Image (tube, rainbow, N blue to C red):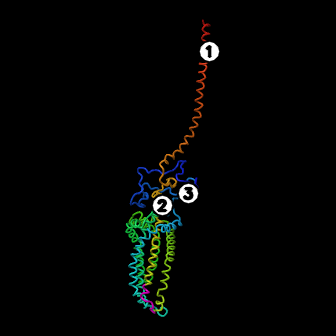
Amino acid sequence: MSGDGGSPGQQQNGGQPQGPTAPGPGAPGPGGVPGAPGHWPGYGPAFGQPGWSTGGGWGRGPWGGVPVAPKPGVLPLRPLGFGEMFGAVFDTVRRYVRPLYLPLSVVVGIGAVPLLAVAFLISGSLRDGVEDFPDITVMDPTDTQVWNLARPLLLFFGMSALVGLVLYVVAGPLATVVLRAATLGRKLTAAQAWQEARPRLKASVATLALVYGPMLLLEALLMTGAVLFGDGLLLPFLLVGCGAFYVTFRLAPQIPVAVLEESGARTAVRRAWQLNRNNWWRSLGLTSLVSLLGAIGTTVINFPLRMVVAVMLPVGAAASGDGGDTRGTITVVLVLTALVSLVTMLATSPLVPLVNGVLYIDRRIRNERLDIALAEAAGIRFAESAAYPQYAPVPAQYAPAQPAPAQPAPAQPAPAQPAPAQPAQPAPARPASAPAEPASGEPGRPAEPPVGKGPEGS
């Protein structure tokens, strides 16, 4: 026996082998029940539907060992550890660069047009604001001077944030579709990924709007009230901010639910809230760590552009008010800043959606045995009692070969029956031959007494 607790088809339950069994006549097909909660199209029955089991899974084998989980793609099909989830995110990025980044590059290219247009349009007003801004060491700037400098910058960074929001909305369904293929180890082209993700864009937008729209509106109202009416609304503003922070990570699997289970916005929010119960700290830690490493990586990539921006940034003009920088210099700075922002958003936009997808898969494996359905979709069959993987196709001879070891048990008492049967057969054979010999070998002896009696009697 191998050291991992057994091999496919290992015997248990009294020595009888456990192998793949064909589904009964009334068993649901591999597609499950479409539209039901927990339904992952093409990957097993839905949660709570007939044919779904809540026991078993990757428990201990019959001899106390833990079977090795199959890994057809970037994830082992069992409950995941923190390091495995972290590695799966970057492993998916490494293996599926084109399906992830080619569609997102198109989105960035489209979004770069209005962003660069805004950069050219505000360069003149930004130059005027910089020239009118006084030396802060000599006198304080007025509200008008601050607004003249801040207004073009707000417009520029607002447009950049809008492009980033559109990119994140597109990256959510796209990264989820790519992760589904990466989990099963399937090849995926950029065109196929976009074709599968595009129908779920509307549901993703509705889900994000349902969750974050009310929170952002309430935060904006409270912030405006705090500015206009004093610090009385500062505490409610902070409380709402803390609640939004909690809800954001509690509802981390909402986009994977909307995409993989093909559900609406309200259903996706309710399902994500229930699915990610007691998993808030792991969601926070994994998302923060992946985002941090992504930010470090993009900082290294953008370092040359950032150095150029830092050198050409008219900080000296803003501090001295001499207006030595021209409009062309400010335009170049704005364009380089836009490029740095676009590259950063492009590189990091799939990371958080991939984290949310990995969290979703882990929660469903732990709570709903999604590993069994994913294994069957990848061509792997499990022995139901011990959850040992058995790689398809299984030979047809394997079914009759399994009961064969079970027949030696009744065959062992069979030798005990021939043992008394053999002495019983020679015993009657010997007396049968003994009387036959005297009858044939001495025929006169039985005839003499009647002859002797004859004369005596006569």
Q: Pointer 1 and pointer 3: residues touching (CB < 8 Å)?
A: no
Does label 2 or label 3 sit earlier along the sequence? 3
Dot 3 crowding, Cα within 10 Å, few <14, some 14–19, many 20+? some
Apparent side of residue 313 relative to residue 424 in the rendered image (left or right): left
Q: Position of residue 115 (x, y in %)?
A: 40, 79
Q: Which label lies toward us, 2 or 3? A: 3
Disc 2 and disc 1: Cα gap in Å? Answer: 96 Å
Q: Position of residue 349 (x, y in %)?
A: 45, 72
Q: Position of residue 324 (x, y in %)?
A: 45, 91
Q: 344 or 225: which is nearer to us?
A: 344
* Number of marks in the rendered image: 3
Q: Is residue 455 above or below residue 31?
A: above
Does label 2 or label 1 sit earlier along the sequence? 2
Q: Position of residue 116 (x, y in %)?
A: 40, 80
- Extent of the magenta region: 322-331
Query: Which secondary structure, mark 3?
Result: loop
Q: Provide the residue designation for mark 2.
A: 367
Dot 1 crowding, Cα within 10 Å, few <14, some 14–19, many 20+? few
Q: Is residue 262 above or below residue 295?
A: above
Is residue 325 inside the magenta stretch?
yes
- Give the image quarter of residue 350: bottom left
Q: Provide the residue designation for mark 3.
A: 66
Query: Which secondary structure, mark 1?
Result: helix
Residue 156 visible at all: yes
The three-letter code of the residue at mark 3 reads Val
Which residue occupies 51% across, 53% down?
385
Q: Pointer 2 and pointer 3: residues touching (CB < 8 Å)?
A: no
Q: Which label lies toward us, 2 or 1? A: 1
The three-letter code of the residue at mark 2 reads Asn
